[in-house]
Image (spheres, grey):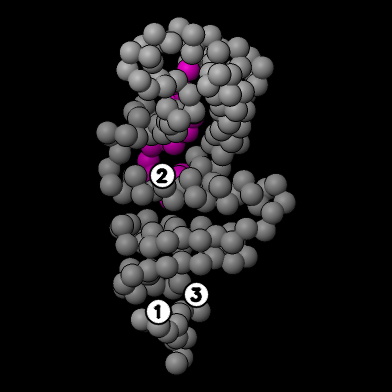
Amino acid sequence: PWNEKLVSIGSVLTTERINLCELLNPWASENYANLNEIRSLSISYKSSTNDLSNNLEQNREIFALRLQEVQYQEVERGVTLVGPHRDDLHVQLGEFPAKGYASHGESWSVAISLRLGAFNLLQNEGAEPILILDDVFSELDTFRRTQLMKATHVAEQTIITAAVEGDLPLGLETERLYVQPGRVMNARD
């Protein structure tokens, strides 16, 4: 009984994730390049059930078959071995996977590129999202900070948080609010 629901719901979830990766990939790649990173970025969906695509019916069949193949192992281990809960996002930088090969700065650039890519995708679909960047400048070098600052101009409204004001790049045109215990103050207060 568990397998039927897992195949039914898991196939829909997996198919939608694959579609999202395909839509997000060009945006994330472009944003990564705009941060002046040398290697190219690509993302894809890494499934515990190989050969999945954006075809829902085909995914249901493959998923159900794969569950039958590993049923003995699942009973033996007491855990479900395939399904969307075992899947991951695969990030590739040039010829190498980001996991294990990306520098600290490159890892932050990947995360920022994915955030900006999600923003671009929503905007391209007609939404008017707010770009929220939570303490992103603290982990970037000066050059990457400047490149990211340029990228923030694509949004009608951007909210950037920083624990240390010095982490914000010079020339960032903003209205600054300072948060202290129990109070939010404008820079003019």
Q: Residues within 10 Å of mark 3 (few under 14, many from 20)?
A: few
- In x, y percent, where is residue 156? 62, 65
The N terminus, quarter of image: top right
Residue 189 colored in magenta in the image: no
> Hey, which residue is sitting farthest front in the picture?
1
The nearer-to-camera label among 1 and 2 is 1
The nearer-to-camera label among 2 and 3 is 2
Residue sitting at x 35%, y 20%:
78
Query: How many numbered tags mark residues here?
Result: 3
Q: Residues within 10 Å of mark 2 (few under 14, many from 20)?
A: many
Earlier sequence position, callout 2 versus callout 3: 2
Residue closest to the eye, 15 or 45: 15
Which residue is identified by label 1? 179
Residue 129 can be seen in this image: yes
Compared with residue 73, is residue 89 higher up or lower down, i.e. above or below?
Answer: below
Task: Please tell me whether mark 3 sits on a helix, a strand or a loop.
Answer: loop
What stretch of residues is rendered in magenta?
A: 32-49
Residue closest to the eye, 53 or 63: 63
> Hey, which residue is sitting farthest bottom in the picture?
189
Specify the amino acid type for callout 1: Val
Q: Which mark is residue 110?
A: 2
